């Protein structure tokens, strides 16, 4: 039996250092996440601080950033880390992505030197947890209409409003909050112990249950001007953070898909029906072949985008949209097909397939729905704006 990504010998496209980083991340996922994640998922809990500290010791938090205790790794190395973490669980990869590519990146890219010194070293070590507050209860795909407001009061700012579906919010030490002010969209690094700031855990989720998700309430939160991210000007700032985080999803989704296909291959070669392994039937082999094909293509797309980013320093938004749209869409199709190969066992928590499928339902729509990415790509192809 050949492993799903061995068909095209894609490992030959990686450097020794990249393979070493992947092996490290796979080992920590195998040792620290896989033995417990089914229970976390069933209970709807996850030890965020404990995991963050372990990931911090390994240099995985903000690993693609430079300075302030960050590892300064390549984009491909960061992508491989996301792939291995999401092969264990999407919620665990989300913890790392939100910490490093949203909260830390926003401060690293748009913050003052004092803000960077105050927050980033502790966040890189996993001693401080961050979250990213953009999505609102009534404003998801259209952040330009956000209702959260920031108004000046002497030398201070007053924030009022709310944010919804915010990963890490219930346990965060600092929240990057985006609000509308007279001069446009502004961002703040908000200590979560500030009076008027509250975050409640969102319960009864059917997806991403091994992830801490919260609703943030901002009720007259008073902040000094030093809490404002001075280089963040307009809506382009938070949207650039989303582009940053979507890169990790491109790789992570392939990790979930690979894990599902690995389980399905093992099951198909050991489960017998009608006197032989179900993997010996033509229809099952057709499913496996199609899934392996899409997994190879998605991985090669992720690797291509990673190499582009390492060469140029950044990816264009439409390039990231191509990756996120394709890889998440194919990953969820792979998860669903693998579930059919496992039959009734496919819905059992003893196997990870249904957990991955449920998680990918969230990954499909967060940080840009499929429809949003289709429109980003369509606008680039035609030059016409179909958002309005």
Image: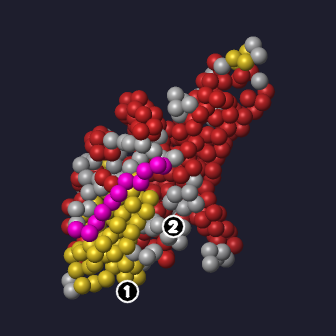
Q: Most extreme residue toward the front, as rendered? A: 204
Q: Which residues are magenta?
A: 195-205
Residue 75 coordinates in the image, percent (x, y) = 44, 51
Residue at the spot x=33%, y=79% of the render? 150
Q: Nearer the viewer, residue 116 or 357?
A: 357
Residue at the spot x=41%, y=29% of the render? 35
In the rendered structure, find residue 294 and report the number of the disc placed on it. Answer: none
Could you say whether the residue bearing mark 1 is in a helix, strand or loop?
A: loop
Residue 385 picture quarter: bottom right
Q: Is residue 335 left or right of residue 131?
A: right
Give whichever of discs 1 and 2 has the lower sequence position.
2
Residue at the spot x=66%, y=24% of the render? 268
| Residue 374 visible here | yes
| Quadrant into which the N terminus falls | top right
Q: Is residue 3 above or below residue 151?
A: above
CA–CA distance in space, label 1 to label 2? 21 Å
Q: Most extreme residue toward the right, as rendered? A: 282
In the rendered structure, find residue 182 and report the number of the disc placed on it. Answer: 1
Between circles 1 and 2, the one closer to the viewer is 2
Residue identified by numbered label 2: 140
Q: Is residue 176 above or below residue 383?
A: above
Q: Quick one: label 1, few (<14), some, or many (20+) residues within 10 Å?
A: few
| Quadrant into which the C terminus falls | bottom right
């Amino acid at each position: 039996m050949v492993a799903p990504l061995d068909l095209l010998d894609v490992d030959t496209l990686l450097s020794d250092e990249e393979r070493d980083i992947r092996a490290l991340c796979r080992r920590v996922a195998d040792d620290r996440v896989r033995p417990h994640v089914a229970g976390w998922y069933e209970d709807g809990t996850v030890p965020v601080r404990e995991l963050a500290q372990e990931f911090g010791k390994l240099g995985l938090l903000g690993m693609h950033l430079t300075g302030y205790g960050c590892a300064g790794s390549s984009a491909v190395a960061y992508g491989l880390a996301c792939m291995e973490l999401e092969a264990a669980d999407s919620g665990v990869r989300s913890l790392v992505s939100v910490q490093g590519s949203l909260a830390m990146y926003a401060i690293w890219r748009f913050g003052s030197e004092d803000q960077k010194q105050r927050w980033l070293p502790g966040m890189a070590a996993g001693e401080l947890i961050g979250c990213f507050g953009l999505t609102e209860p009534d404003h998801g795909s259209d952040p330009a209409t956000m209702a959260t407001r920031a108004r000046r009061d002497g030398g201070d700012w007053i924030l009022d409003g709310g944010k919804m579906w915010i990963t890490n919010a219930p346990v965060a030490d600092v929240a990057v909050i985006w609000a509308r002010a007279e001069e446009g969209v502004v961002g703040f690094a908000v200590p979560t112990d500030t009076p008027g700031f509250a975050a409640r855990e969102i319960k009864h989720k059917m997806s991403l249950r091994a992830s801490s998700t919260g609703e943030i309430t901002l009720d007259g939160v008073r902040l000094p001007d030093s809490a404002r991210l001075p280089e963040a000007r307009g809506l382009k700032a938070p949207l650039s953070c989303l582009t940053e985080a979507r890169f990790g999803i491109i790789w992570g989704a392939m990790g979930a898909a690979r894990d599902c296909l690995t389980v399905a291959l093992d099951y198909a070669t050991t489960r017998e029906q009608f006197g032989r392994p179900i993997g010996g039937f033509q229809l099952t082999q057709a499913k496996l072949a199609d899934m392996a094909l899409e997994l190879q293509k998605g991985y090669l797309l992720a690797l291509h985008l990673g190499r582009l980013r390492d060469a140029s320093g950044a990816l264009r938004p439409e390039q990231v949209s191509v990756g996120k749209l394709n890889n998440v869409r194919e990953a969820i199709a792979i998860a669903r097909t693998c579930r059919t190969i496992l039959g009734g066992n496919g819905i059992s928590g003893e196997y990870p397939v249904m957990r991955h499928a449920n998680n990918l339902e969230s990954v499909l729509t967060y940080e840009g729905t499929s429809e949003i990415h289709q429109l980003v790509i369509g606008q680039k192809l035609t030059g016409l704006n179909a958002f309005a």
